[in-house]
């Protein structure tokens, strides 16, 4: 949402815009997100925060896939738990503030039209199994950003963590968008 606001406010300074599992704001949350979201916010332990964050970001069938003698879930939980502090899952205050932002902020059709008319390359990436930002939000962005400069990637089995789940495909989309930018 911040990237959308900056692009609306200063379109002449934007070379390209990539919106990964994003929203214009004020959407109806997916009820399935409530248990892991509240668990991540109120867990008394870092381990609880990590477990709930992983469940919030990835579909369970993806997490249950084997990787050697482990599963994806245990690998990701270990990864998140061992990150340096600046990369750990957000704490209570940050999660509450993010939640309030997406529920109270809203980018109007008129503001999105500024982006559409600006002509810079736009990439909208959606994940059809995202329980944090419903996939309909990416569809709405795509519908309100018409034009030949707009491209979309939608992942049928992706969760909110598509930059990890589909790292190569997302990276390719980002690189192509940057290459389409006016240089």
Image (cartoon, helix red, strand yellow):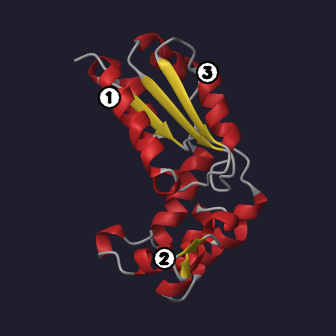
Q: Quadrant of residue 107?
A: top right
- Mark number, residue 75: 2
The residue tagged 3 is: 144
Secondary structure at badge 2 equals helix
Secondary structure at badge 3 equals helix
**Which of the two residues, 19 or 173, is positioned nearer the viewer here?**
173
Q: Residue furthest right?
A: 31
Left or right of residue 27, residue 160 in this image: left
- Mark number, residue 178: 1
Residue drawn at (45%, 32%), measured in percent from left and top?
4
Mark 2 is surrounded, within 10 Å at the Cα level, by few (under 14), some (14 to 19) or many (20 or more) other residues, namely some
Cβ atoms under marks 1 and 3 closer than 8 Å? no
Cβ atoms under marks 1 and 2 closer than 8 Å? no
Please state the horizontal and vertical placement of residue 38, each as a whole percent of the image.
64, 73
Q: Residue furthest front?
A: 68
**Can you say whether 28 is above or below 36 in the image?**
above
Secondary structure at badge 1 equals helix
Residue 87 in view of the camera: yes
Please state the horizontal and vertical placement of residue 14, each as a whole percent of the image.
31, 24
Please state the horizontal and vertical placement of residue 106, each as a whole percent of the image.
58, 36
Q: Earlier in the sequence, mark 3 or mark 2?
A: 2
Please state the horizontal and vertical placement of residue 21, each as a whole percent of the image.
55, 44
Q: Earlier in the sequence, mark 1 or mark 3?
A: 3
| Gap between marks 1 and 2 measured at Cα | 31 Å
């Amino acid at each position: 949402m911040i990237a959308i606001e900056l692009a609306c406010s200063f379109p002449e300074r934007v070379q390209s815009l990539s919106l990964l599992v994003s929203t214009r704001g004020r959407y109806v949350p997916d009820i399935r997100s409530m248990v892991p979201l509240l668990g991540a916010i109120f867990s008394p332990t870092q381990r609880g925060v990590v477990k709930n964050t992983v469940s919030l970001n990835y579909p369970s069938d993806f997490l249950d896939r084997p990787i050697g003698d482990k599963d994806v879930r245990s690998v990701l939980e270990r990864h998140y738990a061992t990150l340096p502090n600046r990369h750990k899952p957000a704490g209570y205050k940050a999660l509450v503030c993010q939640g309030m932002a997406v529920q109270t902020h809203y980018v109007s059709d008129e503001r999105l039209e500024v982006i559409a008319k600006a002509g810079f390359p736009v990439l909208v990436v959606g994940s059809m199994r995202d329980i944090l930002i419903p996939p309909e939000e990416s569809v709405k962005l795509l519908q309100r950003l018409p034009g030949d400069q707009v491209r979309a990637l939608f992942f049928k089995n992706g969760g909110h963590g598509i930059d990890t789940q589909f790292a190569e495909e997302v990276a390719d989309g980002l690189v192509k968008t940057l290459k389409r930018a006016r240089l």
